Image (cartoon, helix red, strand yellow):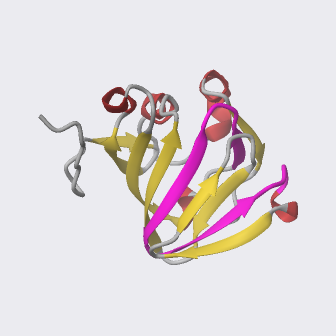
């Protein structure tokens, strides 16, 4: 029996996070906590607030579209800004502030977190018509996430 996990697009279960439908490509339970991978299509208004993770590194693979990343400071206006096009890989180590926003009408991303326990945060938020991150500070704290600044303007 193979220990490899192969998951083609659309094979993973979907869940709702705010207005987004996210495919759980690989769950932390399937990797003994080592990694979680999610696939989603983002719009400009889906940008998260500038934040940091204290427990995991985060990576993104841009599958389509173009995405702008802000990294390295606790305020958007002092962050380094990088644009990533389809095919790009972006790495954000734990404790480094970051956020991202599509600069095309939409972009499709793989989001990879090592280790994978943070997936519980995304599942616990559930569906909502608009982002309301500041209303979930208790859940954010439980997963080691800290909000630092607003999201980029839509």
Residue 130 at what x, y percent from top left? 52, 48
Q: Is residue 86 left or right of residue 9?
A: right
Residue 128 at what x, y percent from top left? 46, 41
Image quarter where the C terminus lies is bottom right
Which residue is at 60% across, 64% downward? 101
Q: Is residue 148 magenta?
A: no
Q: Is residue 53 left or right of residue 15?
A: right
Q: Nearer the viewer, residue 52 or 45?
A: 52
Q: Is residue 116 left or right of residue 25?
A: right
Q: Nearer the viewer, residue 139 or 69?
A: 69
Which residue is at 52% across, 32% downward? 118
Which residue is at 62% across, 51% downward? 48
**Residue positioned most to the left:** 1
Residue 20 at what x, y percent from top left? 41, 51
Q: Which residues are magenta?
A: 50-75
Decide if residue 154 is in sight here.
Answer: no
Q: Is residue 72 magenta?
A: yes
Decide if residue 6 is in sight here.
Answer: yes
Is 122 above or below relative to 48? Answer: above
Is 28 above or below relative to 112? Answer: above
Is 97 above or below relative to 78? Answer: above
Image quarter where the N terminus lies is top left
- Snapshot quadrant of residue 72: bottom right
């Amino acid at each position: 029996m193979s220990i490899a996990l192969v998951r083609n697009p659309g094979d993973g279960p979907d869940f709702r996070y705010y207005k987004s439908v996210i495919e759980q490509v690989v769950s932390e339970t399937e990797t003994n906590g080592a990694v979680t991978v999610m696939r989603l299509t983002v719009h400009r208004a889906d940008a998260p607030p500038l934040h940091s993770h204290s427990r995991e590194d985060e990576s993104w693979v841009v599958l389509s579209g173009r995405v702008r990343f802000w990294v390295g400071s606790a305020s958007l206006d002092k962050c380094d800004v990088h644009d990533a096009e389809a095919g790009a890989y972006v790495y954000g180590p734990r404790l480094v502030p970051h956020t991202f926003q599509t600069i095309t009408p939409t972009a499709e991303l793989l989001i990879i977190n090592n280790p994978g326990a943070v997936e519980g945060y995304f599942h616990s938020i559930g569906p909502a018509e608009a982002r309301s991150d500041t209303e979930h500070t208790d859940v954010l704290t439980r997963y080691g996430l800290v909000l630092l600044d607003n999201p980029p303007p839509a």
